[in-house]
Image (cartoon, grey):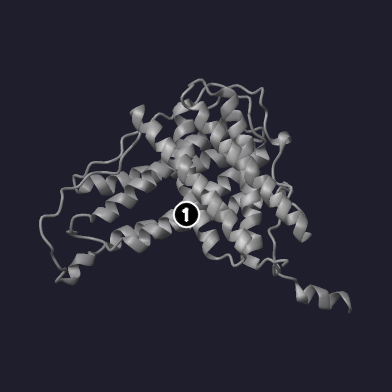
Amino acid sequence: MVEHLPKLTSAEISMLWSTYIGDTMSICVLKHFLQTCEDQDVKPIIKLALSYSLDHVAQISDLFTKEGIPLPNGFGDQDVNLQAKKLFSDVTYLRYLFHMGRTGLNSYSLAKSVSARKDVRNLFKQYSNQTDTLYDRNAELMQEKGIFIRAPYISYPDKVEYVTERKFLGGLVGHRRPLLGVEIAHLGINIEVANVAKTILLGFSQVAQSKKLSDYFKEGYDLGKKMVEDFMIKLKEDDNSYPSTWDSTITNSTESPFSDKLMLFHTNVQSAIGIGDFGLAIAASFRKDLTVNYESYILRVGTYAVEGAKLLIDHGWFEKPPQSIDRESLRNQNK
């Protein structure tokens, strides 16, 4: 009996399309990492991540071909220079993969949850399992090397309590209650994500061929730096421990391993990840000053991302995602 497969839904097409684009970018980035990695313990992690991305591109290519859907252009050999010198440290490679893996776990879970067809659900289940394996191996290696940055600690609770006063929610000024464990956790996550982003952006600003793009990347670095400072203040105000600074070594190379197109797209991906993390933090935070702070950064990072999208459009690099038919345009063609 031949299994009948209905057409892909809008959600399935979009999630597969975005995964394809993202993995073609990752292949370029990981090839450079692998080419320049000096730590023999780190290389297997990079190789594993690269093999997964190559598998994803091949599988989605096959599925889109069968469905008669054109493959996105994405990124390719023209977007990576494997002869370029090392730009970031091996520690940065590990931390980059760790945080991108955390994002992958969330993205693939969402993609599976909005997919109907069994073959598509199976794909995203496979991708989630692969990312889970990569994430665990990465975390274990980072702990072995003593570079895994844990979330801040708090004392164990010794009794069950209920909130009895509305001042628990706090205000924008005056005395505020101590941070909840979950609020501390989200501050820590956002500090780490911002640290990763600002290191990558500073490196991009150093090697970008376009002065305009170099300035844009430096602007993003400055935004990430301010973000780290603001979130650290929230932790310090309550005398909480906070994530230590981590190796952000950038070499003196001015030869870009990546095309300006790839670096600009990558920056927009980082912005989207940041906005998503702020949204999760708002949902988990009860103190008003925290939600206001996160909302402020959603606006600032969102504005920064829009400027990046404009630059992609101006350079002819913005590949249009799948969309519904423009009926109004079709009607106007007959007039």
Question: Can the viewer see residue 291?
Answer: yes
Q: Position of residue 55 (x, y in %)?
A: 64, 43
Q: Nearer the viewer, residue 309 or 44?
A: 44
Q: Quadrant of the N terminus?
A: bottom right
* Circle 1 crowding by C-alpha within 10 Å: few under 14, some 14–19, many from 20: few
Q: Would you name the residue on which mark 1 appears?
A: 106
Amino acid bearing label 1: Asn
| Left or right, 117 with reference to 293 | right
Q: Quadrant of the C terminus?
A: bottom right
The number of callouts visible is 1
Question: Can the viewer see residue 25?
Answer: no
Q: Nearer the viewer, residue 212 or 32?
A: 32
Residue at the front extreme, as displayed: 1
Residue at 23% from the left image edge and 66% from the top image edge: 169
| Left or right, 5 with reference to 237 | right
Q: Position of residue 325 (x, y in %)?
A: 75, 71
Q: Nearer the viewer, residue 57 or 311?
A: 57
Q: Position of residue 190 (x, y in %)?
A: 38, 48
Q: Position of residue 132 (x, y in %)?
A: 46, 46
Above/below status of 128 relative to 99: below
Residue at the left extreme, as displayed: 158
The answer to which quarter of the image holds residue 9 is bottom right
| Left or right, 86 with reference to 173 | right
Residue at 33% from the left image edge and 61% from the top image edge: 284
Residue at 24% from the left image edge and 53% from the top image edge: 181
Above/below status of 119 relative to 262: below
Residue at 63% from the left image edge and 38% from the top image edge: 27
Secondary structure beneath dot 1 equals helix
